[in-house]
Image (cartoon, rainbow, N blue to C red):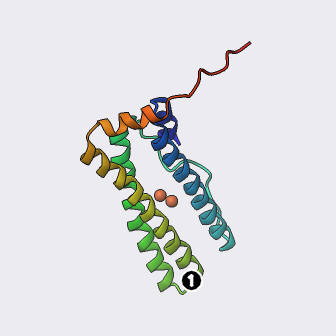
Amino acid sequence: MYWHFHLDDQGFGPLAALFKRIAIQEMGHVERLAERIIFRKGDVEMVAAGPTEKVIDPQEILARAATMEQEAVTVYNQFALQAGQSADAATKQVFESLVNDEEGHYDQFDKQLENIKRFGPNYLALQSFGQAPAEAPAKEE
Ligand SMILES: [Fe+2]
Ligand SMILES: [Fe+2]
C-alpha cells in the first residue's frame, strides 16, 4: 500500500494501480491465513510483520516487490509440504493456492522490470504521460 501511494503521487498511474490490486489480494491472503489459524484453534497477532521499507524509486520498488514475492513462494512451498506431512490437506491447499497467487504477482512485477530494461527509463515516464488528467480538477469553493 505504501508503494501504491508513492507511485500514484509520482504520477505512475498504471503501476500504482497494479500495486493497489495486488495489495488488496495480499489482504485476502491475510484473511485466509487468519481464518485457517483460528479454525485450527490458534490465534492471530494483528500487528505488522516488520517496518515499512521506505523505497520510493519505481524501479527499486519493483525489484524489491519481485524479491518479496519469490521469498513468499519459497516459504509457502515449505509450509505446504509441512502441512502435507502433518496430514492437513486443507491447510496444504491454502498454501498451494497462495503459491499460485504469489507466482502470479512475481510475474507481473518481473514483466514491468523487463519492460523497463527493454524500453529504457522512458517506459515509466510514458506511463505517467498517459495518466495526465483530461481536464483541470474542479476548484474548491
Ligand atoms: Fe500473499
Ligand atoms: Fe504476493
Q: Give the residue type at disc 1.
A: Asp
Q: Which element is circle 1 on? A: loop
Q: Out of 125 and 52, give the one closest to the viewer.
A: 125
Q: Out of 139 and 58, give the one closest to the viewer.
A: 139
Q: Is any part of residue 57 visible from this angle?
A: no
Q: Say whether residue 60 is left or right of residue 76.
A: left
- Determine whether 4 is above or below 139 in the image: below
At horizontal 56% and vertical 84% (from top left) the residue drawn is 89
Name the spot of residue 53 as percent of width and height, x first. 42, 40
Question: How many numbered marks appear?
Answer: 1
Q: Residues within 10 Å of mark 1 (few under 14, many from 20)?
A: few
- Determine whether 78 is above or below 128 in the image: below
At horizontal 38% and vertical 42% (from top left) the residue drawn is 61
Name the spot of residue 2 as percent of width and height, x first. 50, 39
Extreme residue in the front direction: 134
Q: Out of 67 and 136, give the one closest to the viewer.
A: 136
- Determine whether 73 is above or below 96 in the image: above
Q: Out of 37 and 115, give the one closest to the viewer.
A: 115
Tell me the quarter of the image containing the C terminus: top right
Name the spot of residue 100 as percent of width and height, x first. 47, 69
Extreme residue in the top direction: 141
Q: Say whether residue 29 is left or right of residue 6.
A: right
- Determine whether 117 is above or below 55 in the image: below
At horizontal 37% and vertical 61% (from top left) the residue drawn is 70
Circle 1 is placed at which residue position? 88
Name the spot of residue 49 as percent of width and height, x first. 50, 50
Q: Quadrant of residue 37?
A: bottom right
Q: Is any part of residue 134 visible from this angle?
A: yes
